[in-house]
Amino acid sequence: MRRKDREMSKEFALDVFDSCEYAVMGMTDENGLPYCLPMSLARDGEIIYFHCAEEGSKIDILRKNPDVCITCAVNVHNAEDKFTVYYESAVIRGKASEVTDYDEKIRGLKAICQKFTPSNMADFDNAIERSIARTAVWRIKIEEVTGKKKAMPSK
């Protein structure tokens, strides 16, 4: 990170990730081209989970190159008196792999649902029963985490 004065701790970065509404996950396709998608990701310790269809471009790319980079930002505020933006951000690098263990698949889906739809958890078991057979779950093992804060000046 170039601006060391804005560098924050791993814990700060993970808090940013946990509180973000969505993150962007970047991958590299077989031609070396970037492929980035907004994703609904949830963390359980040092593992990040996402769910998706069982086939598609993202899956094809990850099977050939599992390296991913996730970025997210929260508390974004445009300055009114300057040409700048204040924010807190996190960048996470890791390796993705498909979850094949049934219990871990449930754990990953539960983490996602608890983050994004906590008020609907009473229906979790029914939803799993209806859709688990056609839902892929992937895990990302966190390898590197950085956090950054560009704070608004005090008044």
Image: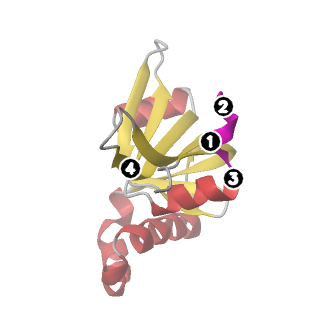
Identity, as a three-letter code, of the amino acid under mark 2: Met
Residue 154 in the image: state x and y as whole percent: 50, 55
How far across and how far down the image is residue 103, in percent? 57, 70
Tell me if residue 90 can be seen: yes
Residue 10: image tag: 3
Q: Which residues are magenta?
A: 1-9
Disc 1 versus disc 2: distance between alpha carbons? Answer: 9 Å
Say whether disc 4 or disc 3 marks the residue closer to the N-terminus: 3
| Dots 4, 2 in contact, CB < 8 A | no
Give the CA separation, mark 4 to mark 2: 20 Å
| Location of residue 126 in the rendering, given as x and y in whole percent from the top left corner | 31, 81
The three-letter code of the residue at mark 4 reads: Val
Question: Can residue 52 be seen here?
Answer: no
The amino acid type, in three-letter code, at marker 1 is: Arg
Q: Are marks 2 and 3 in contact (CB under 8 Å)?
A: no
Give the label on residue 1, or none: 2
Tag 3 near tag 1, CB within 8 Å: no
Queried whether the magenta region covers residue 91, the answer comes back as no
Pointer 1 residue: 6
